Image: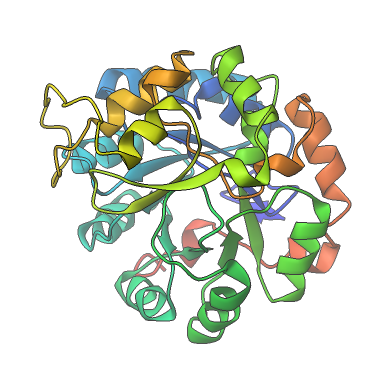
Amino acid sequence: MKLLANINLKYPLIQGGMAVRVSTAPLAGAVASAGGIGVIAATGMSMEELRREIKEARKIASGGIIGVNVMYAVRDFAELVKTALQEKVDLVISGAGFSRDIFSWGREACIPIFTIVSSARLAKIAEKYGASAVVAEGTEAGGHLGTDRPTVEILPEIKGAVKIPVIAAGGITDGGDIEKMLQLGADGIQMATRFVLSRECSVAESFKAHYLSASREDLVLIKSPVGLPGRAIRNVFSEALSRGEAPKPLCENCLKTCSHEFCILKALENSRLGNIDRGVVFSGQNVYKIKEILPVKTIIDHLSRAFSDQVTSNININSSTIPGTG
């Protein structure tokens, strides 16, 4: 599939952006190099750090497609998005809230904007403002959730409501899951949790071990200070949250709106560094299905069997598809 001048996308597969510093250059670059869309999660990074990550990911990607994901809920949302656009990433993905301004920024930079949505209503709004595609994310996803409905319910509704490409997300871990979403009309797939259990994901080994040991019963919903529920793997920290005993934060004013019950960015950083009992371990609902850590290329090679040539040709995010630039 021809994209963005001389860049070719082999598979309509997006590696989900996982904050804080779970999705960094080594993972995003490896996914891009293997034929998918590699995504750096910018939330929690400084502008200079984000610039460095983009440059490093490009070296690893060998011409593959690199995107940046930014949570709308963070106070420096605009600065992070504009930094990614200045660095000429191939696309920007936004979630955990809805920005109208981001679409004009994308048009000015001639860079596609993808929006994570959980309803047909929001998908239509995103299309109206200029989204090049929407990511239909159901309740099976990890991290912050915008709905309590499964992807299999919201995907057909969203697909029927818009003309732009619709990417399925939430609980997708293997080829069988991909085939199901494609049969429901998805133009592509976003996966995050599976890529945590890759060699290139730079989280602590204890973080990966917590993923590998998780059972179906270990998945819990927590209340995030962002104001949204979040799906995580049960641990000492989540149990403390359920009892109302979370450590009170030393607030750094990092969110636009915060309940101040605990610091979500600090909790995510703790777990990434291996301090599992002092942090939140976000994960998709079906993490228990993943039994091994593999190189990114091997993961994508296994998943590639689920994609057909017909589906692969459905997504085109070159500049002519950015509303208002043609």
Q: Is residue 323 visible?
A: yes
Q: Which of the 4 quarters of the picture holds residue 206? A: top right
Q: Answer above or below: position of 184 versus 134.
A: below
Camera-side residue of 24 and 82: 24
Q: Is residue 32 visible?
A: no
Camera-side residue of 235 and 70: 235
How many marks the image carries: the answer is 0
Locate residue 136, reporting x and y percent: 51, 65
Q: Residue at x 47, y 58 (%)?
A: 319
Of the 4 image quadrants, the one containing the N terminus is: bottom right
Q: Answer above or below: position of 319 versus 261.
A: below
Camera-side residue of 278 and 46: 278
Locate residue 89, reporting x and y percent: 44, 38
Camera-side residue of 175 and 132: 175
**214 left or right, relative to 249:** right
Q: Residue at x 38, y 62 (%)?
A: 146
Q: Answer above or below: position of 249 versus 319.
A: above
Q: Residue at x 16, y 32 (%)?
A: 254
Q: Looking at the image, what colour scheme do you see? A: rainbow
Locate residue 156, reporting x and y percent: 60, 80
Q: Which of the 4 quarters of the picture holds residue 215? A: top right
Q: Residue at x 35, y 36 (%)?
A: 84
**316 left or right, relative to 113:** right
Q: Which of the 4 quarters of the picture holds residue 249? A: top left
Locate residue 112, reporting x and y percent: 43, 55
Q: Residue furthest bottom?
A: 160
Of the 4 image quadrants, the one containing the C terminus is: bottom left
